[in-house]
Amino acid sequence: MTNAEIEAFLAICAEKKFTAAAEKMFISQSSLSTRLKTLEQELGCTLFIRQRGGNSISLTSYGETLYPLALQYRELTERMRDIASTAPRRLRVATISSLGTYLFPDIYHSYLTAFPEVELEIYSNDFTESICSSLERRILDLAFTTGEPTSRKIRCVPILSEAITFICARDSDYPQTVALKILDAKNEVYVSWCAEFDEWRRQSLPGSANPGVRLSIMEQLRFFVEKPGRWAFVPDSVAKGLTHRSKKIVTRNLQFSIPPRIINCLLLPQTAEEPCAAGFLQFLRQHLAEWYDAGRILL
């Protein structure tokens, strides 16, 4: 049985008429009758007797037995709602490590400043299958990744298309505009940003199978790129974060194009209606609009 069925029963008890009970609940009389019929089928008994010659009704013996229990049910439900209303608002977010390191920290800080009542839990996870499992189990509310859902229960919302750019140490001798043919993979600091980037790199960069450094620990990217001669392809948010934190690192233009990195938000469909998650997505959209041109924002 549901709250709607119990409330329909109590409304009929209070008003003694189906029409008045339906009006009190702001539903049609047919909807009210359906709720009552469902409740009676679940209980296996008739709860009301219609009086001849009118719309007036009275309780059966089963209805009289149910009435005090229904009042207790309503009271318990209201008490549970009171607990929920006083519980702290919480949002649990996971990102792949590059987003958590370079793009989202400022967004988290601004969000908590605007919504100090929210408890924010932040996780790093680079494995889409694990992320989807956590979303399904409601361990996470939102996840931001380059992957797509491994479950039909998970909704995928593209939020950002990031250009891939070139970075190197300031005192390296790379020209202001870099041609692909001058790049030596032995000096590359390689990070797998997304499947599309990896495929482009495999087909386009000579020696891509043997880069100088293969990196999965995002905090070490700055250390290696600061070394003269080293270079890397990185998403725009990573380039902005690194050049902001280190004066030794600069960006260079490219004579060629690289597929962008698409950032997706993964969530359960019902989560999009929850206040904390919906508020964060709206807040995220506003901040991305301040940092990127409109063509790159997909949210």
Image (cartoon, helix red, strand yellow):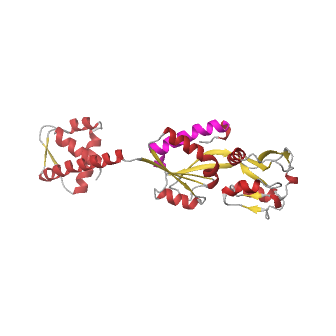
Nearer to the camera, 5 or 40: 5
Query: Which residue is depicted at the point 60% across and 49% down?
Result: 264
- Segment colored magenta: 269-293
Q: Residue furthest front?
A: 247
Query: Which residue is depicted at the point 71% across and 60% down?
Result: 215
Nearer to the camera, 206 or 236: 236
* Residue 169 drawn above or below residue 128: above
* Residue 214 drawn above or below residue 141: below
**Looking at the magenta stretch, what is its main secondary structure?**
helix
Image x and y of residue 87, in percent? 37, 48
Q: Residue furthest bottom?
A: 210
Query: Which residue is depicted at the point 55% across and 40% down?
Result: 110
Image x and y of residue 92, in percent? 49, 51
* Residue 147 drawn above or below residue 299: below
Nearer to the camera, 264 or 232: 232
Judged left or right of residue 248, residue 30 is left
